[in-house]
Image (cartoon, rainbow, N blue to C red):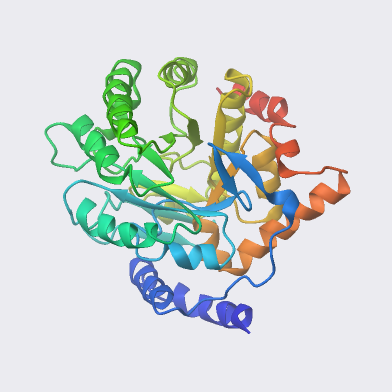
Amino acid sequence: MFSTLSQLALPLLHALEPERAHELTLRALEAGIYPRSEAPDDPRLAQSVLGISFANPLGLAAGFDKDARVPRAFLDMGCGFAEVGTLTPVAQPGNARPRVFRSMDDRAVINALGFPNQGHRAALNRLARRAQARNGVIGVNIGANKASSDRIADYVAGVEAFAGVADYLTVNISSPNTPGLRDLQGPQELDKLLERVMAARAEAAEEGRKPPLVVKLSPDIAAAELPETVLCLERHGVDAIMVANTTLARDGLADPTFGARSGGLSGAPLFERSTAMLAKVFVLTEGRMQLIGVGGIDSGARAIAKIEAGASLIQLYTGLVFEGPPLISAIKTGISGHLSQNGLQSVGQMVGRRAQEWAKKYEDAA
């Protein structure tokens, strides 16, 4: 019944301005109006990543639940994990509206949100209540305030605030909607950032709090700079790399009016670009680094491709905008079917099987 209701609700939500539709969705989830996943996951989907047990590799990407209002809902719907944020130390409104645009033709969204959120304290209170139960994996995505005079200090504050309640932390230095934020991906600035962030986590570890640390990269990093960036991440001992955030590229869009909007593009057009980059990172690290794949996942086939390109875990957001909650079970069913067809015993055996093929696409496009 809930699946039918979801499909009926989608056209109504698509008729609304995107940000309003999103808020209505959050309120429905807060009220418990969503489908629960009743059947247990296929045990072949389970794996240990980042030292954490995941029932399945599919998670909610940051950006949907900026203030940690509804992570439980996505776990109930069948996600293996949910990532909240991006959270900044001080509450901020984000950029001026309108700032979210949807294209049905391109199955894509452009957002220029600029990290609107209620700040660390509000989210921490919600997550602290949830931490008492400790059921389900929840990551926290941390960022910097637009007006901050020391953005690296903002990330340190994020580690200090959430180390005790997050199952893992994601350092988001790749959003295109905060001016200058992506500069932190440059080798020198990245080195400074990681030195301070890893030191903050080491201090938290002394108090028994040591969540794995993930760094989220932009798909727009120049190909020539990617090896040095990855080497820097490895050198500092980050636990995983997330590929990739939204893009400023507008390649191949069907709707030129949509493409002219400012902001980061997500959804189907990002799939090839982000998957090829993911595979290149897998090849650069020779499979040593665990990767989280994000960008354009809207079907079982695309989820499978992302895993075979090198992702141990995958995330979706924009796909849900167009497909609704049934996409969660459809992706898991697709992965299970692929395992059976190929005689594989676990999803871990899929990781990186076609990384070389996808990495060549990245190299050819460079």
In the rendered view, tell whether residue 212 sits above or below residue 365. Answer: below
Where is residue 39 drawn, in percent x and y?
A: 69, 69
State the image quarter where residue 218 is shown: top left
Q: What percent of the width, then of the height, locates residue 38?
A: 65, 73
In this view, 52 is above or below 327: above
Total marks in image: 0
Q: Is residue 79 left or right of residue 341?
A: left
Task: Say which quadrant the C terminus sits in.
Answer: top right
Q: Is residue 160 left or right of residue 52?
A: left
Q: Is residue 121 above or below residue 197?
A: below
User: 172 above or below 316?
Assistant: above
Is residue 163 left or right of 246 when viewed as pictured?
left
Q: Answer with the quarter of the image where residue 121 lies.
A: bottom left
Asked whether residue 109 appears in the rendered view, the answer is yes
Where does the N terminus fall, quadrant-wise?
Answer: bottom right
Residue at horizontal 51%, vertical 41%? 251
Residue 295 at x, y percent in the picture:
53, 45
Identify the residue shown where x is 39% and y is 41%.
Answer: 169
Residue located 16% across and 49% down the image: 90
Horizontal side, residue 74 vs residue 328: left or right: left
Residue farthest toward the front in the current orientation of the protein:
207
> Closest to the observer: 184 or 152?
152
Q: Is residue 104 at least partly visible in the picture?
A: no
Q: Residue at x 30, y 20 (%)?
A: 195
Q: Nearer the viewer, residue 176 or 58?
A: 58
Give x and y (percent) for residue 180: 24, 32
